[in-house]
Amino acid sequence: MFVAWNGDRAVLKMISYTKPYDWSDEAITDSAVAVADSAAAAVDSAYADLPEKPFDYREEIDYLKDDIKYLKESIKENKAEIAKKEKDIKYLEKHHQYPEEKKGSTDKNYGDKESEFTLPPLKQEIEEKEDLAYQKELDSIRIQEFKLVKKIAEDSFNTYFNSSLELDVSKDILKFRDANADVFVYTDYGRIVNEGIYGKMMKRYEFGEIFNNIYNSNSSYNLYFDKEKVRLVSSYQHKNPEVQSHFSAIYKGKKNKNLMSLINDKSIGYYAINIDGSKYFDLMYSLLKNSGESEYHKEMELMMETMKIVLDEEAIAKIAPGNGIFVLNELKTKTVEYTDYDYDDDYNEKEVKKTKEVAMPNFTFAFATENEGYWNRIFNLLTTNKNTAKKFSKNGDFYAFKEEKSTGYFDQLFFSVKNGTVYVTTSTDNITVKNQSDISKNWAKDSAKYPASGRFDIERLLTGLEKEFKSPSERKTLDFVKKNVGEVYFKSEAKGDALETEIDYSIKNSSENSLMYFFDLIDEIRKIKESEKKQPIL
């Protein structure tokens, strides 16, 4: 990575280079092998006279401690071995050596300790020298490659600074750029995946052409640092107009106001979609159809025709047409019990029951359906099947799932099917329609209007995660961040021949603008961390 700058501009250049190796040049290969062999012989003769290193008990203790770390990963199976090694450490700390093995003794605990944990000193010295020689050779190659890429970078910098300081960008890219944006980014995923190392990798797979076709797209991003919020507007476009038309068709679903009634301004956030699920089949067929003249092109065409015959697309689309919403209402604190292990002075293991507090989500997931009977049959089956009936039950309009002893992030789940909607929730009260405030009504209106939209209140999320922050420093940082973090809102739609998504992040402090807001936020967190490091005045 290279950076250059003058009085007006700074340029960053990233270059990757690996020197190609000609494996067909047998003369070079044989020569390299001969040199390597002679070098190895010289190393062997040079190391033959090295003196043997004396036993270092401190080094041996370090080896044993490393072994203990490894053994503790499967502590139940290795507790006896851990206890033996702990005793070895204590003996070494006191006597600086292992006990002498008595003549005729069958005790194998100490007889071959050195061979078990350390290489013989001479062999160890040889390997260290070999590693050093290899590292020097590797460093030499890296230096050569660095000199090469440095020259490439310098030539590129000279060309840029001697020009009009304008990058040569095609008009196809610039048509996505908004002149009012503070930052513009363009990414050609089609070239990234289909060319270079990724393209070569995909060609090695029989169905790689399909993945190349899926990723044959480009994306652009316009970033705005407004006074009260940060806005990011992204645009996605597939390079094949036919495939792009199918993507756009998915984004033209029906509205569903029934789902939007679940939105409320007291929730942490929600994510809502209104898409046309039946159009996924057309998109899938189009991707398979336009996968190029691959080896299995005819097989793909036959598979598509078979799928069209076997699948009843309309019936599948009625099960879940494409309207859905997830609402995270709040995070509650739940105390759960777990098992830990302690050890006595003799290193005997003992199970200990402990408790901890975790954040438990209170949420509702709902989606529209035109086939209520299908879902009711599924839930009825779960309550009557002998393998699932232990955890599933029916109470009125609700089906309930409950573990015998819940140690997870929710106690139980409730399922219900009514008014053309399937509900999955942690509380039956969540699906009761409540009066919405004016702001909730606006969110609900947008959620019914756009194919995908949502909001996320970071302050309320952090409030629900308070128990996860333990130390005074963490608590102090959390309190500061909660007072200053904003809210995220996004919406997606098909616009022209592209899919456009806008993400807004509102700010709450008095910074000069939304860019300085981030710098101010980071600076204040740094000050909090630095204040914790200061020594108290006595």
Image: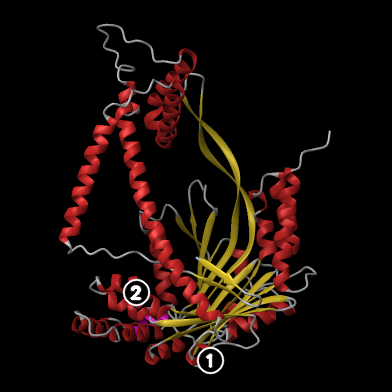
Q: Which residues are magenta?
A: 313-318
Identify which residue is drawn at 28% across, 26% down. 49
Tag 1 secondary structure: loop
Task: Tell me the kind of residue under disc 2.
Answer: Gly
Q: Nearer the viewer, residue 129 or 209?
A: 129
- What secondary structure predominates along the stretch shown in magenta? helix
Q: Amino acid at mark 1?
A: Lys
Q: How crowded is the residue under tag 1: few (<14 C-alpha within 10 Å), some, or many (20+)?
A: few
Rendered location of residue 495, percent (x, y): 53, 90
User: Would residue 220 be found to the left or right of residue 503 on screen?
Assistant: left
The answer for how far apart the CA atoms under marks 2 and 1 are is 26 Å
Label 2 crowd bin: few (<14), some (14–19), many (20+), radius 10 Å: few
Give me the residue at 42% from left, 25% from top. Answer: 60
Residue tagged by mark 2? Answer: 196
Q: Is residue 9 magenta?
A: no
493 sits left or right of 179 in the view: left
Q: Secondary structure at mark 2?
A: helix
- Identify residue for label 1: 175
Q: Pinpoint residue 45: horizontal percent, then vertical percent.
A: 24, 33
Horizontal and vertical percent position of residue 453: 58, 78
Q: Residue at x 75, y 77 (%)?
A: 227
Which residue is nearer to you in this view: 409 or 493?
A: 493
Seen from this angle, which residue lies furthest top? 103
Q: Label for residue 327?
A: none
In the rendered view of the protein, which quadrant contains the C terminus?
Answer: top right
Query: Which badge, 2 or 1, is on the more N-terminal residue?
Result: 1
Q: Where is residue 254 shown, x and y percent of the image? A: 51, 87
